[in-house]
Image (cartoon, rainbow, N blue to C red):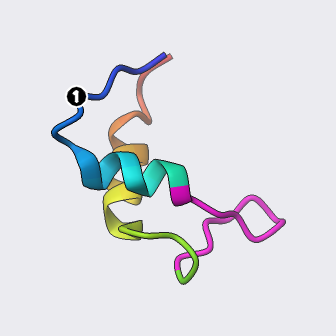
Amino acid sequence: MVAIHPRFNKLITALRTAVENGEGILDKEATSHDVLFDSFRLSLMFWH
């Protein structure tokens, strides 16, 4: 579980609008703030 402070509204929007293309890959055209979503996902890469 991850807690996100409400002031990070762009990150919250990115997480709510994330769309995958059916192959498990992020559809960057359909996702708002896709670069922010990718950064968040990469920051969690080493957490178990």
Give, as a single range, the part of the protein colored magenta.
17-28
Which residue is rendered at x = 37% and y = 45% of the image?
12
Which residue corresponds to the image point at 32% horizontal and 49% vertical from the top-left?
A: 11
What residue is drawn where x is 43% and y is 21%?
47
Is residue 24 on the magenta stretch? yes
Residue 48 position within the rendered picture, expressed as x and y whole percent measured from the top left:
51, 16
Of the pair 7 and 26, the residue shown nearer to us: 7
Q: Position of residue 25 (x, y in %)?
A: 67, 65
Query: Total of numbered circles in the picture?
Result: 1
From the viewer's perspective, is 30 left or right of 4? right
Q: Give above or below for 1 relative to 33.
A: above
Residue to which mark 1 is pinned = 5
In the picture, measured across the screen, residue 40 lies left or right of residue 27, that is: left
The quadrant holding residue 43 is top left
Which residue lies most toward the bottom here?
29
Residue 48 placement, left or right of 42: right
